Image: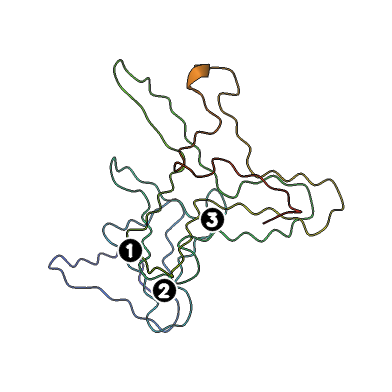
Amino acid sequence: NIDGKIDINSATGEDITLDSGGAINIEPYAGSAILLDGTISVDAGVVTGATSITSTAFVGAGLAIVSTATTGNALDIQSTALTEGSALLVNVDDTLTASAEKVLLFIDYDKSGVTAASQTSKTTGLHIDMADAATNHASGTVYMIGAQIDIDSANAQGVLVNQGIVLKVAADDVGEAAQNYGIAMTVMDGGTDIKMQSSADPA
């Protein structure tokens, strides 16, 4: 046990290794913070299973990422050899039986700055960019799906309201009507702009 300030400094570039057969716990005093500056690598080594960072909070967010950078990415997830699974998995198992209201993925953007004269403010809430740069084999098949939404109920009992997409664009009637679009699409010439089919005829 060490009571007091601990200063570990490797100014000349050597690695600092904490090796333990058990867990390594870093628990700051109430109201204090743990500051990590630079690249942080978490490696499970030869341990079977996933490497994880677990944060438990009694109040507020379980894990908060606050970035003051003005360029680049606040959170950068790079996956270079994924053969199955997901680059980002949000797995929520809901066992609640009482009334509840939740959002599984929430993008909250609040603009308060006044856009000055001759300035343009452009913000995209969700941008999906998928590109196949390879020349694939003639008998190969490549599927790229920008977004897939599956909503299903195992039993029809009760009042079930399933909605795939709910769009509200300038629903408060504030804006320029001629510049508002519910859906704007550009599709390859000769392709199908919109295809709709019944669940009884899924072909």
Report crowding for label 3: few under 14, some 14 to 19, many 20 or more residues within 10 A (C-alpha): few
Residue at left offset 56%, top offset 30%: 182
The amino acid beneath tag 1 is: Thr
Report crowding for label 2: few under 14, some 14 to 19, many 20 or more residues within 10 A (C-alpha): few
Compared to residue 165, the image places residue 8 above or below, namely below
Q: Position of residue 195 (x, y in %)?
A: 61, 44
Q: How many marks?
A: 3
| Front disc: 1 or 2 | 1
Secondary element type, mark 1: loop
Along the line of sight, the residue nearer the viewer: 199 or 75: 199
The amino acid beneath tag 2 is: Ile
Q: From mark 3 to mark 1, how far is it between C-alphas?
A: 49 Å
Q: Which residue is mark 1?
A: 135
* Res 57 label: 3
The amino acid beneath tag 3 is: Ala
Report crowding for label 1: few under 14, some 14 to 19, many 20 or more residues within 10 A (C-alpha): few
Q: Is residue 175 visible?
A: no
The single residue placed furthest to the front in the displayed view is 190
Q: Position of residue 87 (x, y in %)?
A: 45, 62
- Earlier along the polypeptide chain: callout 2 or callout 3? 2
Secondary element type, mark 2: loop
Q: From mark 2 to mark 3, how far is it between C-alphas?
A: 18 Å
- Earlier along the polypeptide chain: callout 3 or callout 1? 3
Compared to residue 145, the image places residue 141 above or below, namely below
Q: Is residue 103 visible?
A: yes
Along the line of sight, the residue nearer the viewer: 152 or 74: 152
